[in-house]
Amino acid sequence: MAKKIERRTSKIHGNGVFATRRIGKGNEIVEYKGRLITHDDADATYGGLDTGHTFLFTLNDKYVVDANVEGNIARWINHSCAPNCKAFTESHKSGKKKKDRVVIEALRNIRKGEELTYDYDITVDGPISAAEKKLWACRCGVPDCRGTLLKAKTKARTKSVPKGRQRKKT
């Protein structure tokens, strides 16, 4: 079977991932892979929001997927405020957190040649400073772009760890 995605230069930011054939709504496209590290190890290695961009994705309350090491093509999928994909974590049936996985799925039908995007959903506690907004600027270019990859935590959110991943190094 022919591959359904490939990495190419993106108009959004640096590298991107593009459909090489039509992908139907609801189809799993790719698993986000990389070395599993603890949240403490991720903080010690990469620091906070003010230290730059990484290929980290929160897997669960114990682990983070570090696609800087052993990462696959999924790490090149760019953010959009109007995405055509969604990223979600899938718990393993055994209950072993190390076996959980991050999956990228089509939110709608995706045309051949279209760039894949998802909302990184980087949620932070407290207000977002102008410097953080600039560092984490969004380049998706959609009409309703919020201008930043960051979202302020709302009262409805109870999760303290961002669901999404940090943006790639620039």
Image (spheres, grey):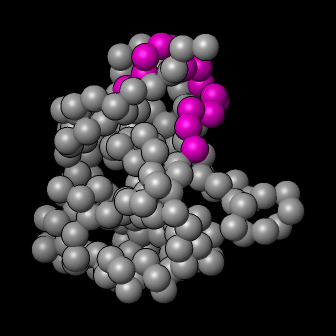
Q: Is residue 87 left or right of residue 119?
A: right
Q: Quadrant of the C terminus?
A: bottom left
Q: Which residues are magenta?
A: 18-31
Q: Nearer the viewer, residue 143 or 24?
A: 24
Q: Residue 25 lies in what quarter of the image?
A: top right
Question: Looking at the image, which residue is at 70% across and 54% down?
Answer: 90
Q: Is residue 46 magenta?
A: no
Q: Residue at x 43, y 40 (%)?
A: 73
Q: Residue at x 30, y 36 (%)?
A: 16
Is 83 above or below relative to 37? above
Residue 158 drawn above or below residue 111: below
Residue nearer the viewer, 37 or 122: 37
| Image quarter of residue 20 | top left
* 10 relative to 134, above or below: above
Query: Residue 37, how many percent across, how many down?
Result: 53, 73
Q: Is residue 66 left or right of residue 81?
A: right
| Residue 49 x %, y % | 29, 75
Res. 93 visible in picture: yes
Q: Count the labels in the image.
A: 0
- Which of 11 and 133 lies nearest the eye of the viewer? 11
Residue 31 in picture, x, y percent from top left: 58, 44
Q: Position of residue 27 (x, y in %)?
A: 63, 28
Q: Residue furthest front?
A: 70
22 within the magenta span: yes
Quadrant the N terminus occupies: top right
Residue 119 shows in this picture: no
User: Residue shown at 85%/57% (left/top)?
Assistant: 93
Report the side of 167 relative to 103 (left or right).
left
